[in-house]
Image (tube, helix red, strand yellow):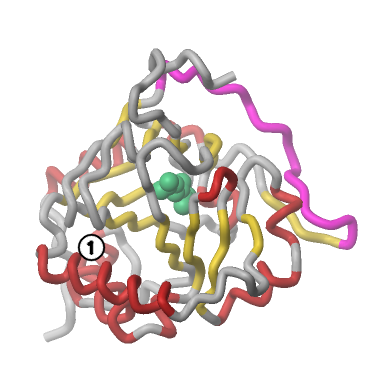
Amino acid sequence: MGIVGTMTSDQLQFFNSQGYLVIESFSSSEEVEALRKRMDQLLDGFDCSSSASIFSTKNQQRTSDDYFYESADKISFFFEEYNLMLLFVALHDHDPIFKNVSCSDKMSGLLLSLGYKRPVIIQSMYIFKQPGIGGEVVPHQDNSFLYTDPPSCTGLWLALEDATIVNGCLWAIPGSHKDGLVRRFIRDDKGVHFDNPSPSYDQKDFVSIEVKAGSLVLIHGDLIHQRIRRNVDPEPLYGDLN
Ligand SMILES: O=C(O)CCC(=O)C(=O)O
């Protein structure tokens, strides 16, 4: 028998109404450990004096260099603002350990529940989240960047350690996916740009999605979400965002 959808109707209902869903204990501690260990090995082989570039959601022009576009079908390293490093793009295709997890029946089962017939992975990232350093990810919808008509993107975000408001958990506006896609990121002969300006969002509408290591967060492609950086000794929560 083929793979079947594995989400319960309560989970599906939560995802459809909120635009995200946390699946606790999705990955075992052994699986999490194997991914982290493999990343240590990949990092050992990375020469940081070589041609890594900076990935920024605030300055999209930075993501338009050749290094960025050539990263689509291999494992590449990027830096974020403020020294946080991020490894990016085709882990699911090029590394057997990451591929096993990304292409598992467990993952497919979730996507089949969401109505996918033949889910395809188009991008994977591994993001380091040391407390106190690293950039922010401004409010966005993944469908702006991974655009299809009709929309078809769902994000799968696996916590490899406990993710909290201190070390960079996700934040999202529940239900915001129901308002549809607000803008597209476009690459044309003028370079890269958005077709519309960003709306301004009230930070009070965001909820933090703090999760334990091994939890998986499903993110609807139209959900407004972000990452806020906080210091180890936190400032007032919304004090430094503008
Ligand atoms: O995990 C993060 O810090 C942000 C990731 C994110 O928003 C995204 O990849 O769309």
- Residue 70 is left or right of residue 180, and the answer is right
Q: Is mark 1 within 8 Å of ligand 1?
A: no
Q: Is residue 100 left or right of residue 27?
A: right
**Residue at the location (57% across, 69% down)?**
48
Amino acid bearing label 1: Leu
Instruction: Report the front residue among 178 and 39.
Output: 39
Q: Quadrant of residue 148?
A: bottom right
Q: Residue at x 41, y 36 (%)?
A: 132
Residue 195 drawn in magenta: yes
**Could you tell me residue 173's position as x and y percent?**
40, 29
Residue span colored magenta: 189-205
| The C terminus lies in quadrant | top right
Q: Between 217 and 235, which is closer to the camera in this rendering?
A: 235
Indicate the position of residue 220 as horizontal and vertical percent values. 39, 48
**In this rendering, does residue 177 appear at all?**
no
Image quarter (top left, top right, bottom left or bottom right) of the N terminus: bottom left
Work out whether residue 43 or residue 90 is closer to the camera in this orientation and state it. 43
Residue occupying the point 47% across, 36% down: 224
Looking at the picture, does residue 29 appear above or below residue 194? below
Nearer the observer, 183 or 169: 169
Q: Is residue 240 visible?
A: yes
Where does residue 223 sit, x and y in percent of width and height? Answer: 44, 40
Q: Please, what secondary structure does the residue beneath circle 1 have?
A: helix
Residue at 42% in and 82% down: 93
The vertical placement of 112 against 223, above or below, is below
Q: Which residue is mark 1?
A: 110
Residue 154: percent from the left, percent from the top? 40, 56
Eyeballing the image, is 242 above or below 215?
Answer: above
- In the displayed structure, does residue 37 sit left or right of residue 78? left
In this view, which residue lies farthest toward the right?
Answer: 190
Other-residue count near label 1 (Cα within 10 Å), few / some / many at <14 / 14–19 / ≥20: many
